């Protein structure tokens, strides 16, 4: 057993847009072999009913770092936009703040996408409109001298939000990998000053989104090797300190840009760059595990691997299914959806001396649970206004779930802000479609589909048989449960709190309901 949990290091490896079925130990029928994620499963515990709080990026990251459902914040649908303001408010208790205040050094290496609150007004000089985008792959405009001088001024300023404000002692990474500015950020400043527009050959085709300022010779293949090297350096440095550390590694992959380093191109055998990028991501994770062992901290480190949401359909999901690989592993839908394919995620944890190697847990868990788990590790109580939707996973790690109060419900949120809630075996979806890209809700209304969906997840994990007409009392009970969790400002015991903005569980501005 680990003798002093309070001194255990924590490494949280968060991948981006990786489906439940993309990890081979979770999907034996799949075609992608993730040997390092599988290694973690052999050495730790696999969670087969793990979920992100949202089916898209920014809101899931908010929930992970705050222990609070994302829809309690101002972000009621979608993601944090280009050059967006910080979603995490300065007064909010976060996982890194909690750990820092209890003797941990905290670092974040990778993708942020929670808003940096850049200290400038967004104009066409930093985000050109469509009419200013180049028309061909080789027609990259040159910045004017006036733009270069402006960029020098704007990108010399520190960001006003970001990881340091959220509680990290050190940060290195990118805000959003496929959005400008195309440069690294270290702590609260860009690493260098962008001095050219991103080459047009890197726009579109599952690479970059909008045009924007970039560092010279910028390329997306550099991300994973750079983050692996930074992680190795950080672990080596912290291993020499008596201070425990929290290393948050939110990878840019296998989310777009689908830029794969040469050794990994074609390795999946699926003729799909996303699948190849999954393998390269798995390799980087293996390098992190090797670093923990190399520097002598493996035995005293809790390692958690998870994804922020399900796989995105636009990376060639249909073509992979034709070849026998389903990133959603049979669960309905994909990224963006209120159906399980949007938010059921791979989640594996290893903690030598605490977690039994080769174990599995089928209890319901959520990304929000990191906050309460850390507090439990530290032997402290959370403030009343922190971790409102977080439940400790420590009893699960120690396989004490039969006697402990554990998570019985989880609230899910789609890209369009549509709600779903799990309670035991039941799942209620408050929209007629997927709430996302798979099945448009307005179209579902026109087709006459019911405005709510009720599924028995034990008998029907694929969410194919809507039981709302057969069990109307169950529908009403779960609507009341969701309303209570919304109105209380929390889903855990404690004093009633306020959400940041009013929360509409029905989104009545889009269509009417009769429940």
Image (cartoon, rainbow, N blue to C red):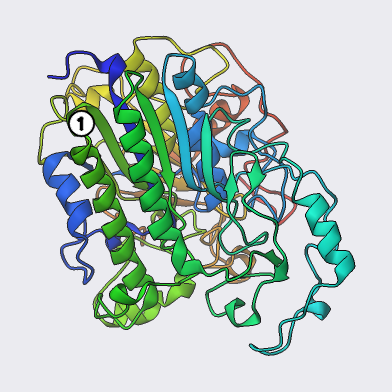
Asked if residue 290 shows in the view, the reply is yes
The outermost residue toward the right is: 146
**Foreground of the two, 352 or 140:** 140
Q: Quadrant of the C terminus?
A: top right
Q: Is residue 332 above or below residue 185?
A: below
Q: Secondary structure at mark 1?
A: loop
Front residue (pair 29, 110) = 110
Left/right placement of residue 335 relative to residue 167 reads left
- x 75%, y 45%: residue: 118
Quadrant of the rendering where the N terminus is positioned: top left
Q: Position of residue 147 (x, y in %)?
A: 85, 65
Number of residue marks: 1
Rendered view: 406 above or below 134? above
Query: Which of these two is toward me, 279 or 477?
Result: 279
Q: Residue 199, located in which quarter of the rendered image?
A: bottom right
Residue that numbered label 1 is attached to: 351
Image location (x, y in percent) of residue 389: 48, 27
**Mark 1 burial class by Cα count in 10 Å: few <14, some 14-19, many 20+:** many
Please name the residue shown 63% across and 68% down the image: 216
| Location of residue 292 in the rendering, given as x and y in whole percent from the top left corner | 24, 38
Q: Is residue 354 left or right of residue 321?
A: left
Q: Is residue 232 left or right of residue 476?
A: left
Q: Position of residue 201 (x, y in %)?
A: 60, 82
Relative to 9, say whether 383 is above or below: above
* Residue 15 visible in rendering: no
| Residue at figure coordinates x 25%, y 75% from the top left | 268
């Amino acid at each position: 057993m680990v003798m002093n949990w309070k001194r255990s290091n924590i490494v949280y490896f968060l991948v981006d847009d990786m489906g439940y079925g993309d990890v081979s130990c979770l999907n034996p029928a799949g075609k992608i072999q993730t040997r390092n994620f599988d290694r973690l499963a052999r050495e730790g515990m696999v969670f087969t009913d793990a979920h992100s709080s949202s089916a898209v990026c920014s809101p899931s990251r908010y929930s992970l770092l705050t222990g609070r459902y994302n829809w309690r914040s101002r972000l009621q649908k979608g993601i944090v936009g280009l050059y967006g303001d910080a979603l995490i408010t300065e007064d909010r208790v976060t996982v890194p703040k909690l750990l820092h205040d209890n003797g941990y050094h905290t670092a974040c290496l990778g993708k942020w996408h929670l808003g940096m609150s850049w200290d400038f007004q967004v104009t066409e000089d930093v985000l050109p409109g469509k009419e200013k985008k180049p028309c061909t792959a080789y027609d990259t405009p040159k910045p004017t001298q006036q733009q270069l001088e402006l960029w020098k001024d704007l990108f010399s300023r520190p960001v006003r939000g970001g990881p340091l404000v959220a509680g990290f002692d050190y940060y290195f990474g990118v805000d959003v990998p496929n959005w400008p500015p195309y440069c690294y950020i270290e702590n609260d400043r860009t690493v260098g000053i962008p001095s050219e527009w991103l080459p047009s050959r890197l726009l579109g085709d599952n690479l970059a989104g909008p045009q924007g300022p970039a560092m010279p010779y910028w390329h997306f293949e550099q991300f994973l090797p750079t983050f692996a090297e930074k992680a190795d350096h950080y672990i080596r440095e912290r291993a020499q300190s008596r201070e425990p550390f929290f290393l948050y590694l939110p990878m840019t992959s296998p989310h777009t840009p689908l830029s794969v380093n040469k050794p990994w191109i074609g390795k999946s055998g699926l003729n799909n760059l996303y699948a190849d990028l999954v393998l390269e991501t798995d390799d980087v994770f293996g390098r992190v595990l090797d670093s923990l062992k190399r520097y002598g901290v493996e035995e005293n480190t809790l390692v958690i691997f998870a994804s922020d949401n399900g796989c995105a359909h636009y990376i060639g999901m249909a073509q992979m299914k034709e070849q026998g690989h389903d990133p959603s592993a049979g669960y309905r839908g994909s990224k963006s959806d209120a159906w399980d394919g949007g938010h059921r995620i791979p989640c594996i944890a290893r903690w030598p001396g605490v977690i039994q190697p080769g174990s599995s847990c089928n209890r319901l868990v959520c990304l929000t649970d990191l906050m309460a788990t850390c507090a439990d590790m530290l032997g402290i109580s959370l403030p009343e206004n922190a971790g409102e939707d977080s439940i400790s996973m420590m009893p699960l790690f120690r396989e004490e779930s039969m006697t402990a109060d554990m998570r019985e419900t989880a609230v899910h949120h789609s890209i369009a802000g549509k709600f779903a809630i799990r309670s035991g075996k039941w799942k209620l979806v408050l929209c007629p479609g997927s709430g996302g890209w798979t099945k448009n809700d307005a179209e579902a209304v026109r087709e006459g589909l019911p405005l709510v969906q009720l599924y028995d997840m034990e008998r029907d994990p694929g969410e194919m048989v809507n039981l709302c007409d057969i069990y109307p009392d169950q529908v009403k009970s779960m609507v009341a449960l969701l309303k209570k969790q919304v109105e209380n400002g929390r889903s855990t015991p404690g004093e009633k709190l306020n959400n940041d903005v009013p929360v509409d569980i029905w989104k009545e501005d889009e269509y009417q309901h009769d429940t």
